[in-house]
Image (cartoon, grey):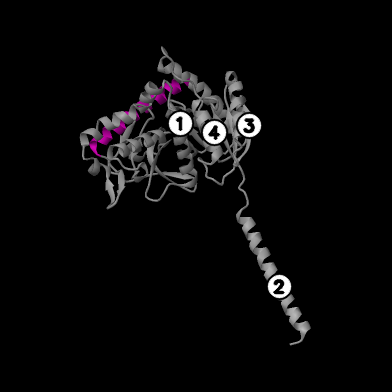
Amino acid sequence: MDHAVLLQKILVVSFIVALFWKIIRYMCNLLNVEKEPVRVLVTGAAGQIGYAIVPMIARGVMLGPDQPVILHLLDIEPAAEALNGVKMELIDAAFPLLKGVIATTDPIEACMGVNIAVMVGGFPRKEGMERKDVMSKNVSIYKAQASALEKHAAEDCKVLVIANPANTNALILKEFAPSIPEKNITCLTRLDHNRALGQISECLDVQVSDVKNVIIWGNHSSTQYPDVNHATVQTSSGEKPVRELVSDDKWLNAEFITTVQQRGAAVIKARKLSSALSAASAACDHIRDWVLGTPEGTWVSMGVYSDGSYGIQPGLIYSFPVTCEKGKWSIVQGLKIDDFSRAKMDATEKELVEEKSLAYSCLN
């Protein structure tokens, strides 16, 4: 073969190989393109839960290890200095996923363009205060924050209310942010759900990750109903019902329920402070599963807008078992409800109806 022809063929092959590797590098770069940052609002950010949750969000616990975030931190004017200290610490921690921090006492600035809103701030009940006094304060707070979200948040903003009374605060927020879809306004009962998982795990001496499908029905209060009738545990011989493994209906129908219902009070008694770390972790779990989806065959508890499922009054924010996929939640349907459960579910619904009536009387 002519040397010139051979050289030409070698050059062509070299060109094709070089082009091939260039295409491979280009495709790798495409796959490694950093995602657009998600803007996450945390209200009450200078408080205990706020201080616990912001590093979790910045580290990727809430939205995943490859999702950059910009944190919007809001608190009241008297907490402005402490809020600035939280911002300083976030900067000092040098979180790779954290692409910016906005710390402000202005609700409009805080809500501008946010994709996720975690509503931690609220007015706590103090000694000597009547329920209506607390409700009136929170109605005022959530009315103002709802208005800011309504006007300035991103179109498909997802909202999680943590501040108590969480279910009814979420309902008030929905009332004053009508353009936010009702399915985008939720409240936190994942903390109660996680507490129930923990109690079963401790009772059976199994890993908490092996327990699934407990349910929290109703209000995030002492009337909530922690239900294990459909819960299972992964064992060496497959999934087994919790009731079968515990084999103590008296404990499951009494002490277990009251322990979960009153766990917050027990933490306060032990720490002299309310739950913060566990609440922050549960909030991250709630948002992560909502955004990224629940594992197949697993449901979680979320306070969501009732559509009448299981005979619960439509229009309440009530905790149901839900599955999540592609950023949407769906209430698990068709679960058998026995008479014991029905009575508990109705009792917590009654409390929510009363809270709703009280909140609306404050509005008027």
Q: CA distance from mark 2 to mark 3?
A: 52 Å
- Marks 4 & 1, CB-CB < 8 Å contact: no
Circle 3/circle 4 CB separation < 8 Å: no
**Mark 4 belongs to which amino acid?**
Val
Question: In the figure, 74 relative to 305: above or below?
Answer: above
First in sequence: mark 4 vs mark 1: 4
Instruction: Please indicate whether residue 29 sits to the left or right of residue 312 in the image.
Output: right
N-term-proximal mark, 4 vs 2: 2
- SS type, badge 3: strand
Is 341 magenta? The answer is yes
**Label 1 element class:** helix
Task: Give residue 80's position: percent from left, percent from top.
Answer: 60, 22
| Residue at (61, 53) in percent of width and height | 32
Q: Residue 215 at x, y = what percent? A: 34, 39
Disc nearest the viewer among 2 and 3: 2
Query: What secondary structure prevails in the magenta region?
Result: helix
Q: Which residue is mark 1?
A: 277
Task: Please tell me whether residue 291 belongs to the stretch shown in magenta.
Answer: no
Q: Position of residue 98 (x, y in %)?
A: 60, 39
**Residue under circle 4?**
54
Answer above or below: position of 113 versus 266.
Answer: below
Q: Is residue 157 visible?
A: no
Secondary structure state at the residue bearing disc 2: helix
Q: Which residues are magenta?
A: 338-364
Residue 102 badge: 3
Quadrant in the rendering for residue 349:
top left
Sequence-earlier tag: 1 or 3 = 3
Q: Is residue 342 above or below residue 274?
A: below
- Tell me if label 1 and label 2 are in contact, CB under 8 Å: no
